[in-house]
Image (tube, grey):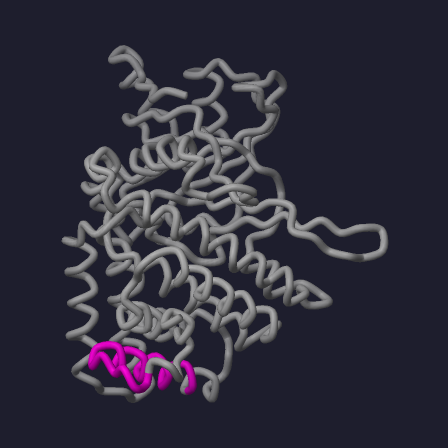
């Protein structure tokens, strides 16, 4: 694997290509990488970047299918939302580092990250491993019928906690990783842009006028910009985990493999960002589908993490509360459920900010006290 840069003679021609389209992506692959491309299709779920699957007639890096990501100075879902265009460099760098560190996932791990094959820092293209058409963990938890067995959900939570705790422990005193990831401007600002800035407007829309919310969101944004605590994934939730579940002829399910994707927000920061986001997401899944499985996954995730790494549980509950308020208006859940989520989010932000030790054992982060 190596970083690739078009030659200066190629630069002007290359900018004629539009990698926000399938035809432009195909032309790029054929002209600049000399690939034999059979088809290019847009992949769903790409909010920040344009993401394509290219089927090849001749293998590239031993692969007959590859994923192509392209970054513009705006998000793929909303061209009015401006974001730093150099974000794919940090995804490339983080995947190279983390993919080569077997100690992060631990022995007998069922988790991997995709391999990366090519990075073009002029046209902002990343070519990486295609792990196949498998669902995200979010889709699996929300749509599985019958619901996932609680033992599989607990195993998923345990595996993910082991991995993310391994990342956090690996990054604390790793000056090489710090030098490579700390400058990720996109990773340090995207949570504020896409999440923290939604909290106060969402609360106001439901009639909640709480001055503490703006204070806490500003503090979270400042922490993201300045914290050097450890390496974090930066966008660790169920939509960024692909899960391969095998089913036997008798209908018995087993976890085969998981892949953690979308690493462009990887940076240095507070580990509570990763822990709070994933735990908060588990709770929202439990509110709409498969409550027992989602609760088992959250309980196992937090309990396992607590035995492996250190995190401030008060920070975790603040991130959980902020996520619930931010996400409220993205789902059609009805006014009653909206009010419940908003009230719980406000409660968690207040309790965490006040550092309420008596309340914490009653919270959804109580496992972190183990």
* Residue interval drawn in magenta: 340-359
Find residue 356 and report its horizontal and vertical position in percent: 25, 83
Find residue 150 and report its horizontal and vertical position in percent: 64, 67
Which quadrant would residue 263 be assigned to in this image? top left
Taking the magenta stretch, the answer to whether it contains residue 348 is yes
- The foreground one among 100 and 74 is 100
Taking the magenta stretch, the answer to whether it contains residue 283 is no
- The foreground one among 97 and 76 is 97
Q: Which residue sits furthest top?
A: 9
Residue at 38% from the left image edge and 69% from the top image edge: 368
User: Relative to 336, is 323 on the left or the right?
Assistant: left
- The foreground one among 31 and 216 is 216
Residue at 21% from the left image edge and 70% from the top image edge: 217
Find residue 153 and report its horizontal and vertical position in percent: 60, 62
Residue at 20% from the left image edge and 42% from the top image edge: 182
Residue at 60% from the left image edge and 45% from the top image edge: 257
Magenta stretch prevailing secondary structure? helix
User: Relative to 151, is 1 on the left or the right?
Assistant: left
């Amino acid at each position: 694997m190596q970083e690739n840069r078009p030659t200066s003679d190629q630069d002007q021609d290359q900018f004629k290509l539009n990698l926000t389209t399938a035809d432009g992506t195909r032309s790029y692959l054929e002209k600049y990488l000399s690939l034999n491309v059979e088809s290019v299709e847009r992949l769903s779920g790409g909010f920040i970047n344009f993401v394509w699957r290219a089927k090849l007639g001749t293998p590239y890096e031993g692969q007959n299918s590859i994923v192509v990501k392209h970054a513009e100075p705006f998000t793929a879902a909303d061209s009015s939302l401006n974001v730093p265009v150099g974000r794919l460099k940090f995804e490339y760098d983080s995947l190279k580092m983390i993919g080569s560190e077997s100690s992060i996932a631990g022995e007998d791990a069922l988790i991997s990250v995709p391999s990366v094959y090519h990075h073009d820092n002029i046209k902002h293209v990343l070519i990486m491993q295609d792990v196949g058409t498998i669902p995200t963990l979010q889709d699996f938890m929300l749509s599985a019928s019958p619901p996932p067995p609680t033992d599989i959900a607990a195993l998923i939570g345990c595996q993910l906690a082991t991995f993310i705790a391994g990342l956090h422990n690996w990054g604390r005193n790793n000056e090489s990783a710090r030098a490579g990831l700390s400058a990720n401007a996109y990773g340090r600002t995207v949570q504020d842009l896409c999440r923290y800035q939604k909290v106060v407007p969402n609360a106001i829309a439901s009639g909640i006028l709480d001055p503490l919310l703006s204070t806490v969101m500003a503090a979270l944004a400042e922490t993201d910009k300045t914290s050097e605590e450890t390496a974090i994934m930066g966008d660790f939730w169920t939509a960024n985990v692909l899960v391969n579940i095998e089913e036997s002829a008798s209908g018995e399910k087993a976890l085969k493999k998981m892949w953690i994707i979308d690493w462009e927000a990887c940076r240095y920061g507070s580990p509570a960002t990763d822990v709070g986001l994933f735990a908060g997401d588990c709770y929202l899944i439990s509110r709409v589908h498969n409550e027992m499985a989602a609760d088992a996954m959250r309980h196992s995730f937090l309990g396992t993490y607590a035995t492996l790494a250190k995190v401030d549980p008060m920070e975790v509950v603040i991130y959980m509360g902020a996520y619930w308020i931010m996400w409220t208006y993205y789902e059609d859940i009805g006014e009653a459920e909206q009010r419940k989520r908003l009230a719980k989010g406000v409660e968690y932000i207040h309790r965490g900010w006040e550092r309420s030790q008596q309340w914490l054992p009653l919270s959804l982060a109580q496992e972190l006290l183990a």
